[in-house]
Image (cartoon, coloured by chain):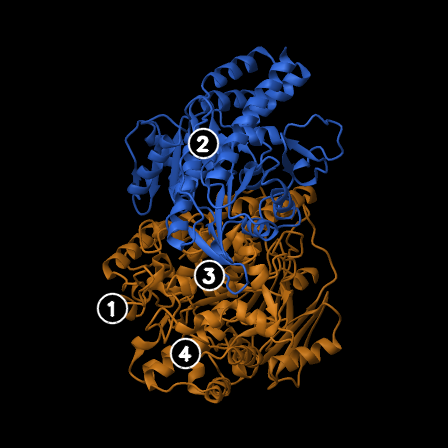
Chain colours: A blue, B orange
Amino acid sequence: MKTLCEKYARKLVKQGLTAPGDPIVGGLDAELVWNRQDQRIKELAILFDELSINSLIFSKPAEPFATIIDFLASRYPDTIRPEDTETRTFLHDIPVCREFSAQAIVANLKKRKAVIIPGNGIISYGTVTPEQGFVFYSSTIFACFVLFFSEYMKEAKTGTIDTEFQAAFDKAVSHLPAPRTDLPTLATGPHNDEEIILSAMAEAGKAVVEYGLVDSFFGNISYRLGKIIYISQTGSSLEELQGCIDPCPMDGSSTAGLTASSELTAHEDVYRRTPVDCILHGHPKFTVIMSMDCDRTDCKNRGKCHVACTECRSIEGVPIVPGEVGTGPTGLCNTLPPAVASCGTAIVHGHGLFASGVTDFNEPFKRLLETENLCRKLYFERLSRLID
Amino acid sequence: MSNPICGWTGKVLHIDLTTGELTTQYPARAIYEKYIGGKGMAGYYLRPHASLKWNDPNLPLLIFTGPLNGTIAPTSGRSTIMSRSPLTGTICDTSVGGKLATQLKRAGLDGLVITGTSDKPCGIEISDDTIEIIETDLWGETTDVVFDRLEADGPNGMSIACIGPAAENGARISAIMVDRHHAAGRGGLGLICATKNLKYISIKGTGKVRVHDKETLKEAREEIFRLTAASPVLMGQHGFSCWGTGSIFDLMDSRRMMPTDNFKKTRFEAAGKLNAAAYKTAFEPRRHGCKGCHILCKKIAKDGRNIPEFETMSHFTALIGNTDLELVVQANDLCNRLGLDTISAGATLACYREITGKNFTPRTLIKSLYEMANGGYLGKGSLDFAESCQKPELSMSVKGLELSAYDPRGAYGMSLAYAMSTRGACHLRAYPISHEILRKPVATDRFSFSGKARIVKIAEDANAVVDSLTACKFTFLAASLEEYAKAYTAVTGVPSSAHDLLTVGERIYYNERIMNAANGFCSGDDDLPPRFFTEEGTSGGGIEIKPLNRNDFLNAKNNYYIIRGLDKDGMPTAETTERLGLTL
C-alpha cells in the first residue's frame, strides 16, 4: 500500500497538479501508512476511523489551480457546481469545507468524493486504491479550471467582473504555461503488426498526457487494423497503456471489449463511416471552455446544451456536438461519429476533442494540439474584444 | 410513527403454515433505519431462530423488500429470500430479480416471515389485503407447469415464486424460481419451502409506494442513468445489456481464469466457440430484465428458454468438459424447471466426474440432473458426495457451497472473498472481479493481496446495503452508494450518506457473522480447498497462473479479521458487536 501511496504522490507532482513534496497520501489495509510524515497527518488519520475508505489524498494544488479553487470557493461558499462532463457525470458537485478539521472534512466527504478546503487544498479518497483519490483530485482541478475561465468570459460579456475576480484572473493567467507548439515525433505508420500498434498507442498516449491535453485517467485512443480495433481500456491512464489495450473484433464474434473504453461504440462507428486508422481523444482545457461558450442566452435549450443543442456550432471549422459519455440515448455515440467522419475532428460540448488520422498518430495529435492552441488564442482574443 | 412513513409500507406479515394464522406486525421506524430492508431486515428477523435446524418448522423463510422497491429508483426490482441453508448450515440470503419485491410492496407489505409446516402441499396467494393459504395439486410439477397454471388463472402482472421437484425430493442444492426467468439459486432455499409444504407464493398488489421527495429522486435517477450509460460493462456494445452476463466469458478465457475440469485447469481450449456471441448466433435471444431495471441483462432465447448466465455457461462447459452449446441450454432449462441451482449442480457434476473418472455424454448429463432432482445423492451437493468417497478435498467449495466460475488463482481478492463470505463460496458478496478484472471503480493488481482485505470488507458492507435497499449489484459497476444514498434519502426522508449506509452495511454483515459463529463456524471454515494452494492453473499468453501463496492468503485473512473487528479465530467480539448496536 505504501508503494501505491508514493506512486500517486509522485504522479500528482509529475502532472503539475501539486508542488513537489506537498502531497500527503495515506493508505490503509490492516495498518495505516503514509507516503511521508507531516504534522497534519494526526488530523487526517481520524478520517480513516470515521469513513469506510482505504486511501486518502490531500495536497495544496500548484498554481494557477490554487488561485482558481480559492477564488471559486470565495464565490460559492458551500458548493461549487461546474458544468463540464466530468463533473456532471462523476463528481456531481464539489463541496467547500471552511476548516481543516477532521470533523468538518468528514461531514463533506460523506457526501462527495472530493472536497475543497480554501487556503489548504483539495482532499479526496478511495475505497479501492489511491488511484481513485488521484482521479477525483485531478477531476476537481480540471472542473474548477474550466468553470473559472468560463465564468470570467461570461462576466466579461455582461461587464460585471469585479476587482477580486480580475485579480484572481490576472494571477491565474500569469501562471499558465506557454502553449506548446512543438510536435512530438511519433512512430510513423501504417502499422500492420499488433506489437507495433500497441507500442505506437502507448507512445501517443504518453505524449497526450505530457502535453497536458488530458487530465487524470480520462481520454482514450484507438487504432484499427483490418477488422480489429485496438482501444485503450476503460479507466486506463493514457501514460500507462502497457497491458491496458483491448483488441475488439468488429464482426461481433467476441465480447473481449467488455473492459474497453466507454467510447468504443463511437470509435467503431467512425471507422465504419470513414477510412481512417486511428483516433485520439483528449480533454484539452481551452477546447472544453470554448465548446461551452455560447452567446444565445435566450436559447430554449439553455442549461441542457450538453444533450440538446441543435445549433450548428463550430470553432474554425471543427464541429461542436452535444452528447454524454457512453451509449445512452443522448450519448455521444449518436452525435460524434458523423461529425468526425465529415471533418476528421470534432469537439463534444463540455467534454473534449476527438481527432482522427490516417496511418499513424502524428496527424490526430497535431489536430489535438493545434485545436487546443487555437481555442486558447480565440478565448483571449474574444476577451480582449469584450474588455476593450 | 408520528410522520407518514415513506419508502417502507410499515408492515411485515407473519404467516404460520402450521396454524394458518396471519399476523401483521408494524416494526418500529428505528428497526427500518437500522436494517434498511431486504437482506438487512431478513437478517434481523432470522437472528432469533438462526440456530434452528433447517428442517425445523419454526425456522423462518424470509422474503423482504427494500425501501426503493416500487419506486422509480433504477434497478430496484430485486428482493431478498433468506433462511438457514440446508446445504451449508450457514445463514443464506439470495438476492433475486423479477417482480416479486415490487408486487409485495404494492400489496402493502415490506416482508413475509413464513414459519410452520402445512399439513398438505399449499400455496400462499396474496392480492393486496387478501391473503390466503390454499391447498394445491401442483406438488410434483416442474416450475414451468406451475408458472403456466398460475399465470393462466391469475391477474396480469402478478409475481410467482415456486419450487420444483428437486426441492420436494430433498435436494440441498434446490432453488426457488421467480417469475419463470429468475432464480434464488444458492444454498438450497428451495428445500426450506419444501419442508414447509409450500409449493408457491403468488403476489399481486395495486398500491403505490409513498416517496418523500420525488424531485430529488428524479435527480438521483438521472445521475444513475448517466453513470450506467457511461459504463462499458453495463451498457457498452460488449456489455451486459447487449449480451447478458455471458459477456464476461471471453474475458475469463483471455485472463486464463476459467475454471476447467473441476478447477484442475484455468483455460478451456474450446471456450472461443462457446462465448456469448455463439449464443447470440444460435439462439437469437431477446432482452429481459427485472422490474424497474433499464439494463435488461437477462436474455431469453427465441424458443422461450433462458439463455444461461455466465456462471452456468462456464460450469456446464469448461468445468465438466462439455463443448455442446445446445446441451448447456438444455441443462440450464432443465435445472430451472426442476428447481436446481445451476452453479452447484455444475460444480457437483464436475466433482463427480473427477472422482469417478467418467465423462458425461449428453444423455448421462441430463440423466444426472434428473437424478439430482429425484432424490439422488448428487442432489446433496459436491461436499457430501466427495466426503462419501473419502475425498472431501475434491469438492471445490467453501463451507459446503460450491465456487462459481472465477478461478481464485487468477484474482487474489476473489480468493479472499470466497473464503470470507458468510454463505460459502459466493462471488457476489464482495465481487472483487469488479476491480480485479472489470476495472471498476479502478483497476487493482489481480495477482496481489495488497490492500485486498480492506477492499473486500468495504465491498461486503456496500453490497449488504445494495441488497437491503434493494437494488442490483451490477449497477454498482457504474454508480456508487453516493448516488443511491441520495435516492434512499429522497424515498424515505431519512438523512443519509454513502458512508452512513456503509455503517449500516457493516452492521448487517456482522450480524451474519454472529449467526454463523453461534452455529459453530470459525476461522477454519474461512478457507479454500487445498488445490488452490498446491496446484498451478493454466499459464500461457504471457500470463502465469501460480498456486496461491498460503502465507500471503493467511496474512490477508488475518488482516480481514482485524479490519472486520473479529478475533483471531474469526469470531465476533463484544467491542465490535456493541459498536454496531448489536448483541451477542
Amino acid type, callout 1: Thr
Amino acid type, callout 2: Gly
Q: Is residue B479 above or below residue A153?
A: below
Kindly report which numbered mark, 4 or 2, lies closer to the viewer in this rendering. 2
SS state under label 4? loop
Query: B468 and B12: which one is in front?
Result: B468
Whether residue A101 is visible to the viewer of this picture, yes or no, is yes
Give left or right: position of B444 versus B30.
left
Disc 3/disc 4 C-alpha distance (Å): 23 Å
Q: Give the crowd class for mark 4: few <14, some 14-19, many >=20 residues within 10 Å.
A: many
Going from the N terminus, do you reach mark 3 or mark 4 first?
4
Confirm or deny contact between disc 4 and disc 2 (CB under 8 A): no
Amino acid type, callout 4: Ile
The residue to which callout 4 is attached is: B320
The residue to which callout 1 is attached is: B534
Q: Is residue B482 above or below residue B366?
A: above
SS state under label 2? loop
Kindly report which numbered mark, 1 or 2, lies closer to the viewer in this rendering. 2
Question: Residue A168: where, in percent of width, then height?
Answer: 51, 16
The residue to which callout 2 is attached is: A212
> Which chain does tag 3 point to?
B
